[in-house]
Structure formats: structure tokens, C-alpha cells
Image (cartoon, rainbow, N blue to C red):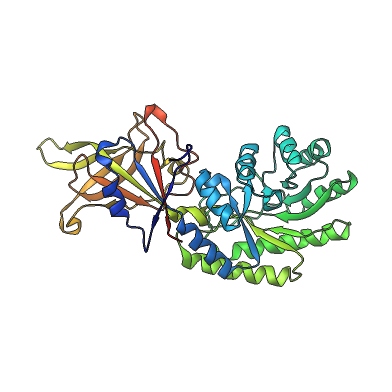
Amino acid sequence: MANGTPEIEYYDHELNIRRVIEQSDLQSMDQALNICDLSSLERKLRLWQKLIPRIKPYYAVKCNNIPVLVKFLADLGTGFDCASKNELKLVLGLGVSPERIIFAHPSRPASHLEYAKEHEVVNGTVDNEFAIYQLTKHFPNSNIIVRFKSESTKALYLLGEKYGCDSEADAPDLMLLSKALGLKVTGTSFHVGSACSEVEAYDRAVEKAENIFRFGELIGHKMDLLDVGGGFPGKNDELFEELAAAVNTSVQNRFPDERVQVIGEPGRFFVEAAYTLICKIHAKREVRNKNGKLEKNMYFLNDGMYGHFAAMFYRPEELTPVLYLDDVESRPKFKSVIWGPSCDSQDKILDDCLLPNLNCGDLLGFRNMGAYTVPIASPFNGFDVPVTRFFAKRP
């Protein structure tokens, strides 16, 4: 680690997770270990550029804000979706130009707007009249991106209850108000929901965006930015290919004018598959019935629901542990429960799973742990969050 910044370790062909584990001396560590393959981000960017080349990705910083990772994406040339002053500071501090940033939060504190104004981050989203009046005072020269609601029927969680105006009832009024106050509306945005799996969701949203563009141009706004938001999966490239094809078709049909800049806000897409979390069993309990027969094993790990599994509180997901043991497939399996380290009885990672008989010191791996893990992890109950080692393929 140089000047407090973690170093990137390089590999030649393929990252060997097991070798990293063997070199990390996890038996002497109380903390879990994150293994981050930064080259996974580069592969994801190439996939994005291949399948939806017209849409420029603006990485959603909230998904994983580790500076090493954000800088890696910045060096690759992505744009950035920031939602706060601190996220703006992070990205601008890495030398990213303000033109590569969208301040994508419809309800921003005044001080955050002042900071954006000072650093010329002009593109920002709005979904209500109070935010527009706020801009007249704090950032009248900003470019207003009207965010409307258009949600998927198949997404892990939706955002429309909190953000996004009605595309028919509210969006025209917001554009008229902006015009009356001398403010510029330059585009529109939406978000179909996190980890969307409904191919048709984007076409419905782009159709609404087309109508908003037409009305904006009709009343004299120069509309030149379409933001298709996020929702793209991070660990299912086949589904992403289907979604990308639908987005391509919809955008080209409804926005054929290449002068309209089209951007997206992928977060999970880039970082979810980049992380593998390695946890150690630090305690074990055998639960037996009154006849002494084993009913289940309970294992206690050094990370849990207040650490890098925190997203499972609001997005329950069945995880499949990877066991770094020899002959694991041939061993008999037992009903097992996996707990996190805290005193909270809600700190349960997996219930009623089948695992071989494990011991204290054995390691469990969890893949696809890069999205909405690092930023919301906390050292609750005094247990440290995992450490991270960064790797990339040698140039």
C-alpha cells in the first residue's frame, strides 16, 4: 500500500482465486478478504461497447465507491453518475472532467448544488417543481434532465415510489415552469429498477421519453440528452445481451437523430462479478435432538449482514458458497445454517443449506459480491469489514 492507496497486483493469464487465498495467510486474520479482479470491469466495458455502442456508460458511483475501482473506470474513459457532493469530489479528484459527470439525484441539498456549480457539473436530474425553484437560486445555468417514472414488472427493487415524475401529468408542467423561469431543460431520464430482467421495460420507457422530447422541443427547449438509467445485470451476460438488443432497437427507432447523446447509468453491471468474498469459519455449533442425533450444524463467519452481505437485508438472494476443500463433492452433506459474527439474531446469511461437515478455520467463498456491498458495510458490534486486494491482468 503506497500513500494509503492499495496497490494493484498483476497476473498473466487468469486470476487464480485459490492461489490468492493460499498467499493471504487468512488463518491469522480476523477479517474476511475481498478479491477484486479489476480486469473484469474492462471486459464488461468491451461487452457494453460491443452490444450498445451508441450509449455511453456513466458508472453509478453509489454501487461501489472504492477509489481504486473508480479510478480504473475513469482511466478506461467511462462517465460517472454521482448523487452527492462527496461522490462528485471523489470523481473530480481523479481528474475526470465535469462533462463526463451527471449529477443524477432529483432532490439535492443546496450545498451540493453550490459545489456542482462551482465545479461546472451542469447536467443534473429533477422530478419536482420545488427542485426547479431551488435551481433558480443556486444553479440557474444548469442543464435540467427531467426524470420520469417507468418501472419494470421484473426487477429486484423499484425506485418509482421515491423518484421520478409522471411522464404525462407532471413532466410537461415541469418543462413549462422551467421555461417560464428561464431555465434550460436539455433531456430526460428514467430508471426501470435494479437488476431488471424484463426486456420490454426499456421500450416502454423510451417511448415515454420520446413524447417528453417532443413536448420539450415544441415549447422551445433544446433537447439533446437521453439517459436510459441502470438496471442492467452484472452476472448474467446472456440476459444483458437480450436487454441490450431491446434498448438498441428502441433507441434507434425513436431517437434516430445521432445528435441526441444517449447515456446509461450501469453500476451492478460493471462491478458485481468483479468481487469474490472469502470468509473464515471462526466458530461452530452442533445442534442435536434429545437422542443425540445431529440435526444441523451452525457456522459463524467473520463477515455478515452488517458487512458485505448488508444488501441482503433489502434484497434477499440465495447464495451458493464455494468450498476451498479437497474431495468436497464426495463428502456427505448436512443441514447447515451460516451466521454472521454480530450478536444480532437477524445476522443470518444462509438458512437450511446443505454443506459437508466443516471445521473452524475452513474457508467459504462467495462470488459476485461487488455491487452494493462495500459502500454500505459497517463495523457493527466492533467487527471489522473485509479487507480488499486488487488484481488486474498484466498489460
Image height of 319 relative to 204, above or below: above
Question: How many marks on residues?
Answer: 0
Q: Is 183 positioned to the left or the right of 335 in the image?
A: right
Image height of 350 relative to 53, above or below: above
Q: Quadrant of residue 207?
A: bottom right
Q: Position of residue 301 (x, y in %)?
A: 30, 39
Q: Position of residue 256 (x, y in %)?
A: 74, 71
Image height of 264 relative to 290, above or below: below
Q: Residue at x 64, y 44 (%)?
A: 92
Q: Is 14 positioned to the left or the right of 90 in the image?
A: left
Q: Is 228 positioned to the left or the right of 41 in the image?
A: right
Image height of 188 relative to 30, above or below: below
Q: Quadrant of residue 202?
A: bottom right
Q: Is 77 positioned to the left or the right of 348 in the image?
A: right
Residue 234 in view: no
For the N terminus, which image quadrant? top left
Q: Position of residue 155 (x, y in %)?
A: 53, 55
Residue 4 in view: yes
Instruction: Tell which of 61 and 233 is nearer to you.
Output: 61
Q: Position of residue 317 (x, y in %)?
A: 41, 50
